[in-house]
């Protein structure tokens, strides 16, 4: 297994201690969880850079990398919903967008087409990661609300953009 794939697996494995720290409510749980989240997020950037630079792009990486990202982000947002820091409907929007875009990619794949991540998707991911980091810090409630709004708006925008740019994949429906 190459290094980028190992980093992707590490990101998945880190979700367990991330959640355990939060649910077991150890001292400084939010800060420890934040550290784990940041390390996991950095493995995402690192594995992508290494894979592209060294030509180590694999089918496993194409499958597991986006899955690991979704698992990590969903775990953090589920925690925020559970503690009342994020409304459930906001998380639902994120999950519905992920399922919809994944479904669109599957339909496109059946037609021999690959839908690569667009800029709006990359911006959504970066904004979401930054907002999750901020939401773990003791920030004013208004900043938390702004973070939720940024996550929702970038999620909706990027989802709509994926469908508009690739609507021809759904032309026979």
Image (spheres, rainbow, N blue to C red):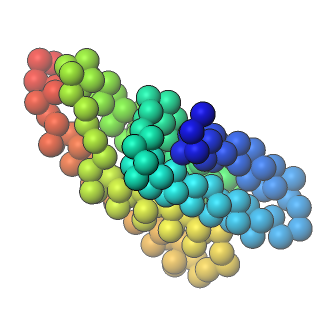
Residue drawn at (52%, 57%), measured in percent from left and top?
46
Q: Relative to 142, does residue 51 appear above or below in the rendering?
A: above
The N terminus sits in image quarter: top right
**Quadrant of residue 33 within the rendered picture:** bottom right
Horizontal arrangement in the rendering, residue 23 relative to residue 76 (left or right): right
Residue drawn at (11%, 18%), measured in percent from left and top?
172
Horizontal arrangement in the rendering, residue 57 relative to residue 70 (left or right): left
Total numbered labels placed on residues in the image: 0
**Quadrant of residue 6 within the rendered picture:** top right
> Which residue is farthest front?
54
Residue drawn at (66%, 45%), measured in percent from left and top?
10
> Which residue is farthest bottom?
140
List x then y, in percent, for residue 162.
Answer: 23, 43
The C terminus sits in image quarter: top left
Q: Nearer the viewer, residue 40 or 96?
A: 40
Q: Nearer the viewer, residue 20 or 86?
A: 20
List x then y, in percent, for residue 160.
Answer: 23, 46
List x then y, in percent, for residue 111.
Answer: 19, 19
Q: Relative to 129, does residue 5 appear above or below in the rendering?
A: above
Q: Relative to 157, does residue 162 appear above or below in the rendering?
A: above
Q: Is residue 125 visible?
A: yes
List x then y, in percent, for residue 166.
Answer: 16, 37
Q: Is residue 74 visible?
A: no
Residue drawn at (51%, 77%), measured in percent from left and top?
143
């Amino acid at each position: 297994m190459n290094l980028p794939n190992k980093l992707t697996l590490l990101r998945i494995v880190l979700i367990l201690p991330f959640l355990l720290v939060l649910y077991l409510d150890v001292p400084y749980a939010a800060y420890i969880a934040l550290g784990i989240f940041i390390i996991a997020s950095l493995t995402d950037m690192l594995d992508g850079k290494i894979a592209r630079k060294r030509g180590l792009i694999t089918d496993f990486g194409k499958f597991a990398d986006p899955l690991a990202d979704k698992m990590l982000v969903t775990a953090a947002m589920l925690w925020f919903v559970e503690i009342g820091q994020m409304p459930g409907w906001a998380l639902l929007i994120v999950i519905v967008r992920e399922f919809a875009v994944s479904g669109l990619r599957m339909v496109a794949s059946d037609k021999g087409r690959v839908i690569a991540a667009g800029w709006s998707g990359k911006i959504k991911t970066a904004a979401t990661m930054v907002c999750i980091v901020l939401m773990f810090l003791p920030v004013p409630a208004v900043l938390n609300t702004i973070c939720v709004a940024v996550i929702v708006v970038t999620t909706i925008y990027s989802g709509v953009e994926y469908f508009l740019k690739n609507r021809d994949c759904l032309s026979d429906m």
